Image (cartoon, helix red, strand yellow):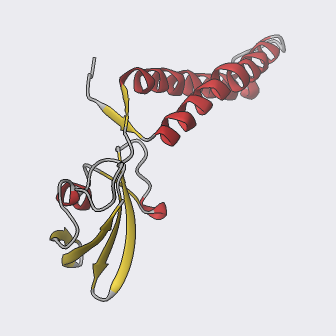
């Protein structure tokens, strides 16, 4: 069994618990009822509803198993108490690069969502930001070349 630590914000943990509860108490019973109903229709070899509902049930069971592992291994990221401290998991960082200001939050890999400026602590930018403070510069290899960011603020 993989015992890798899974870092989550308090909000991220709440979201996963909500998803788990929804799957276990709502979705799975609904799909199980569909499987039973389809099974009662007769010939299973040509019953598309039975096949589809069984596949959905398998997917839901897989996700429930995955969430159980995540929730057991989850470590909640503590929020930084002071501003301008070093960048760590849970930090919101304001960066400047080429005259543009960008704001990122450093989160665990399960919460990473680059479209919403949530970057994993294991991503190239996340890795170089960890431990850095306001005023420091970091360099990241990107597909378009090297990007240099200046750290403006850490919260």
Asked if residue 58 lies left or right of residue 107, the reply is right
Residue sitting at 55 percent across and 21 percent down? 61
Q: Is residue 61 visible?
A: yes
Residue at horizontal 82 percent and vertical 16 percent from the top: 37
Task: Please report the residue visible at 84 percent of the width from the left and 15 percent of the height from the top.
Answer: 41
- Depth check: 124 or 104 in front? 104
Residue 105 in picture, x, y percent from top left: 39, 58
Residue 18 shown left or right of residue 154 in the figure: right
**x, y percentage for residue 73?**
36, 24
Image quarter in which the N terminus is found? top left
Q: Farthest residue toward the bottom?
A: 99
Vertical comparison of 94 with 53: above or below: below
Residue 49 image-quadrant placement: top right
**Vertical relation: 83 (above or below) 28:** below
The reply, left or right, for residue 141 in relation to residue 34 is left
Q: What percent of the width, then of the height, locates residue 20?
A: 58, 26
């Amino acid at each position: 069994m993989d015992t890798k630590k899974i870092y989550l914000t308090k909000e991220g943990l709440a979201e996963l618990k909500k998803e788990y509860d929804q799957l276990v108490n709502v979705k799975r019973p609904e799909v199980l009822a569909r499987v039973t109903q389809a099974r009662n229709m007769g010939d299973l070899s040509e019953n598309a509803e039975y096949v589809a509902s069984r596949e959905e049930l398998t997917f839901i069971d897989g996700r429930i198993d995955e969430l159980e592992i995540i929730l057991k291994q989850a470590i909640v990221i503590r929020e930084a108490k002071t501003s301008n401290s070093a960048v760590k998991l849970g930090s919101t960082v304001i960066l400047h690069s080429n005259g543009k200001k960008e704001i990122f939050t450093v989160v665990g890999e399960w919460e990473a969502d680059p479209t919403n400026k949530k970057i994993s602590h294991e991503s190239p930018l996340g890795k170089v930001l960890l431990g850095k403070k306001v005023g420091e510069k970091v360099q990241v290899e990107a597909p378009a070349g090297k990007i240099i960011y200046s750290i403006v603020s850490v919260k």
